[in-house]
Amino acid sequence: MFSQASVSAQGTLPLPPSPFAGKIGNTYSDSTPSFPKPITAPDGAPNIFLILTDDVGFGAASTFGGPIATPNLDRLAKRGLVYNRFHTTAMCSPTRAALLTGRNHHAVGNAVVSDIATGYPGYWSVIPRSAATVAEVLRQSGYNTAMLGKHHNIPMQQTSQAGPFDQWPTGLGFEQFYGFLGGDTEQWTPKLYRGNAPAEQKYDKDPSYILDRDLADEAISYIHGQKAAAPNKPFFLYYAPGTAHAPHQAPEEWIAKFKGQFDKGWDVIRSETLKRQIAMKIAPAGTKDTPRLKDIPAWSSLNPDQKRLYSRMMEVYAGMLAYQDAQFGRVLDELDRMGESGNTLVMFIEGDNGASTEGSMQGSTNELGTFANGATEDMAYLNSMLDKLGGKDSYGHFPVGWAWAINGPFPWAKQIASHLGGTRNGLVVSWPDRIKTRGVRSQFTHVVDVMPTILEAVGINAPDSVNGEKQQRVDGISFAYSFDAPSAPEQHETQYFEMIGTRAIYHKGWFASTTPARVPWVMGASDRDAMHYDWELYDLSKDFSQANNIAAKHPEKLSELKALWTSEAQRNQVFPIDDRQTHDRSASAKIAFAPRRKNFVYWGKGISVADTVAPPIRGRSFRIVANVDIPQGGGNGAIVASGSKFGGWSFYLDNGRPAVHMAFTQQPAHQSSVIAKEVLPAGPAQVVYDFDYDGGGYGRGGLMRISIGDREVARGRIDRTVLVTAGLGETFDIGDDTGATVIDYPGDKRFNGGISKVEVFPK
């Protein structure tokens, strides 16, 4: 059905222009016109709708036996195929790079998330031009291309309005982009971009705004417009909503749908999931559950307050995933209504890695505050937030126990590439006009296989050269052979894995993997030499869940696979191994690309710059000098703001009084303010903020002094300061506090006067 003989040859992109086929005489009357022929997709080429969710474990969605009802993914599965041995890379940016390019993540410079890039080719977080994306290939082959949602594949130093933009979606083959940059964003007040520019903040005008609904609206609008303009031209729509990455947020009525459904706890939920998976043939009969990680407490050992809190946290996660499924269903409904479903190849990947344990053992109302900034939350505070979880006052993440439960039946979780809890995700494929069989497919497949599969379905080869750049090998193997052949031998026989030191190799059913030497819910590094981890061995042809370590029985096979891993690592830019998940590592690229400036100048309000090119004011002393014009009636609003109420600074006017606020987290005990008593009169003024940092490491406090001109008018203590602002896409704003605000301002968050100049002096 999808033989290579039927795929058209395509060596070089762009395709050469067709020669002039007319005739040129002396005048138009004795000449024959002929226009260039537009490039068109192969006859019958399908629309492509590719969906990738975020931090969703294999055993979360009902489609894969999980406890969270996803009826729209279920109905997609009923008119298509379910792949139960599909794999990702164990982390976000790497999976996305591999998905878009069809190449192994280190081979395209995306070994880890772009936030912790280091100075080695496999770790630069730069997709090379020698690895053209599926979007670029399709765009130059007669498709319209668009991307909606999360893009976490830009080097952090390139996320500003100065670019360069070649790693933005519009530089990677997408004609249109609407979404967010970085690892996560708020559902309620996201920082979004359209193309390469900041998008309108719709939530300023719509109090009911939520991102997942907005992305579905945008998808429907895009499909309507594209088919109105070119009904016979296929589209490629990549839809990456960012759900269910923290912050876990959802409409209250969707959270309420799951009230009480997780009261039985993570042990029972995981056990029930495996029973359903076996009944649905998602897992083969006889599949063993893998044991609870030793650090996770048994549900029965928890006290009533813990059980109530942790159940509520899981209800929030479930409500978020279910709401996203409903929005995806709206897009499916519209494809059905328009008559486009039959010839639309839908590929839905449920999760870019396993569920995340980054919320700690007790969960958190502020993921970045606890995981990255070292904040603490006691049980009294967490329980006081019970009714606010999932809403605008929470940047929440559930406990490790729930991640383990919904990664079932596999061991470990996100970040751990050595074990299937980090890398096994569900895939659903539907193409009603071409795929006539239904059911489960169990061939080994990997995220690098998606691009080759799409190209084969379309009827084109991966090009040898794109935009003048010779293309590197494509590592993926099309799995279109399995569409109508459930028992076909698998063709992807060998695949290495590596993430932050955890390593594995799959080869013809065997799976060798390192024993994790650090836990992913704590920032830090292993105390083991990265090249001397212990290794385990599994026969996945007989052991679906990676439950039976047989390394002691087959030492020769383990040695063979370890050597194979090294060979694959050498040809994929995996070395040097780096098992650090530390602030020092995350600072590597920031230090390398930090602006070498003594001062930062901003000429007016309405400016927002990416955090990576903003003044480096965290963990150090600084001065801010703002030349403002106070309106009649008094000044209010942000002069400078960075971050949000979950972690950030605001330098503002409070009813005419110069003020500073540091939100270390959203907890009342973590707020520090300095407010002058003097009110600025109408007219020009210079407001100066001087911060004298205590030193001694990250996250310390210091003395804040406020002056009007050269006259000090207030001073006070800032107890603690953030290292990482929350959320990750928040910007450094002049005259505004975009996204989630740092504080609730007395009036409008926007400064109501004039700003002629703001100058920042890091010390």
Image (tube, grey):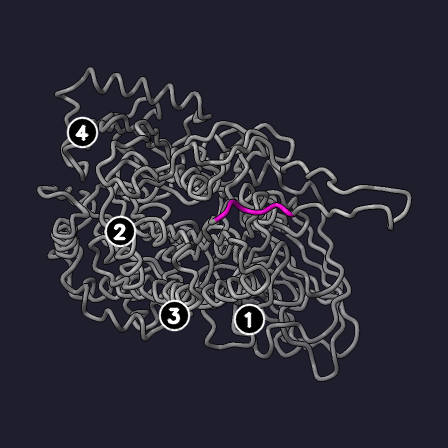
User: Which one is earlier in the sequence, the residue at label 1 or at label 2?
Assistant: 1
Does the rendering let one see residue 369?
A: no
- Name the secondary structure under disc 4: strand
Residue found at the far bottom of this picture: 633
Disc 2 to disc 3, how far (Cα)? 21 Å
| Image spot of residue 184 (x, y percent) | 45, 55
Residue at numbered disc 3 = 391
Residue at numbered disc 1 = 202
Disc 4 to disc 2, how far (Cα)? 25 Å
Disc 1 to disc 2, how far (Cα)? 32 Å
Report the amino acid beneath label 2.
Answer: Ala
| Image spot of residue 231 (x, y percent) | 54, 60
In the drawing, what numbered circle is on residue 403? 2
For label 1, the crowd category at 10 Å Cα-Cα, with few meaning under 14, some 14 to 19 and many 20 or more, is some
Residue at numbered disc 4 = 539
Does the rendering let one see residue 360?
A: yes
